[in-house]
Amino acid sequence: MTLAWIVATSIAGGALSVGCAAIFALTVRAAWVPMLVSLAIGALLGAAFLEVIPHAFEVADPHKVSLTILGGIFLFFILEKLMLWRHSHTEQGEGREWHGETHDHGRSGLMIVVGDAVHNFVDGLLIAAAFLQSIQLGIITALAIVAHEIPQEVGDFLILLHSGYSRARALAMNLLSTAATLVGGVLGYFTLRAAEEWVPLLLGVVAASMIYIAVADLIPGLHKRPELRATASQSLLIALGVASIALARMLIGDAHAH
């Protein structure tokens, strides 16, 4: 049953995120993307602080889990720095000064697919770790991952189109990269079952990834619109994102209770 949940959420989550991204990208509703980002921030923070961290504290030493979360945030910082350094080095090597913008050199499409596949594989491992603790935790984690994947997939889809991919091929490549979520989920199910003592600590990494993505990657983008109206809208949408996780947690809990 646990493996079935992992497979189902991996497939459904990937198809949902890519499908929504394609709809937004093809209809060119760019104004909707900030709304998605704000909701994703709320969903990520809600899942981390309302579900993942409390559950990890229940099944493992809170001090060890806290240390894992701290180490995970630091690890994601280093990994992102390495990715930015590599991008900067490549841009400068080709005679362009790097300022953080995305430049297309005919390879960005392939690079984005490979990077997305690795990211999705890790997401699959995290989903498996959550489901191995409980169905409720797994569903909440999967929902949070899908929430932040939609804005990311919108960007990936647009980059693929900019790289010369047709719309059909861009959609196919994005769907292909989401298959890595299923691979990571199934592999995580079998490997983590053999090392269950590591699962609570991996939950700490799950929480770290959610917090880091929300705080370091998504929130800075919202600060580009400091006007009061935008701030109020962003705050409301973040609160709705948190509320959606709280509501899902209540509904899933009630369903299991019955």
Image: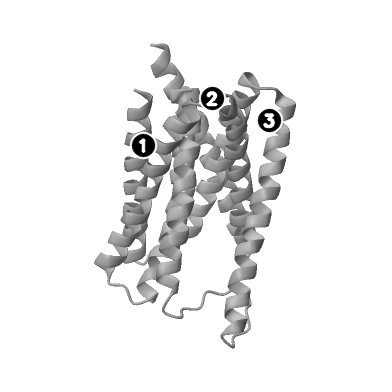
Question: Which residue type carries mark 2?
Answer: Glu
Furthest-top residue in this view: 258
Q: Identify the residue at horizontal 31%, vertical 65% (top origin).
A: 170
- N-term-proximal mark, 3 vs 2: 3
Q: Residues within 10 Å of mark 1 (few under 14, many from 20)?
A: many
Q: Earlier in the sequence, mark 3 or mark 1?
A: 1
**148 above or below 192?**
below
Residue 189 in the figure: left or right of residue 84: left
> Marks 2 and 1, how far apart in space?
21 Å
Q: Secondary structure at mark 1?
A: helix
For this rendering, which residue is in front, 112 or 184? 184
Residue 206 in picture, x, y percent from top left:
57, 38
Q: Quarter-wise, where is residue 67 in the image?
A: top right
Which mark, by number, is residue 65?
3
- Element type at mark 3: helix
Dot 1 amino acid type: Thr
Mark 2: secondary structure = helix
Within-10-Å neighbours for mark 3: few <14, some 14–19, many 20+: many
> Image check: 101 left or right of 253?
right
Q: Is residue 160 visible?
A: yes
Left/right placement of residue 11 relative to residue 201 reads left
The residue wearing badge 1 is: 9
CA–CA distance between discs 3 and 2?
15 Å
CA–CA distance between discs 3 and 1? 25 Å
Q: Which residue is mark 2?
A: 196
**Nearest-to-viewer mark from 3 and 1:** 3
Residue 16 position, x and y percent, is: 34, 47
- Alpha-carbon neighbours of circle 2 within 10 Å: few (<14), some, or many (≥20)? some
Mark 2 in CB contact with mark 1 (< 8 angstroms): no
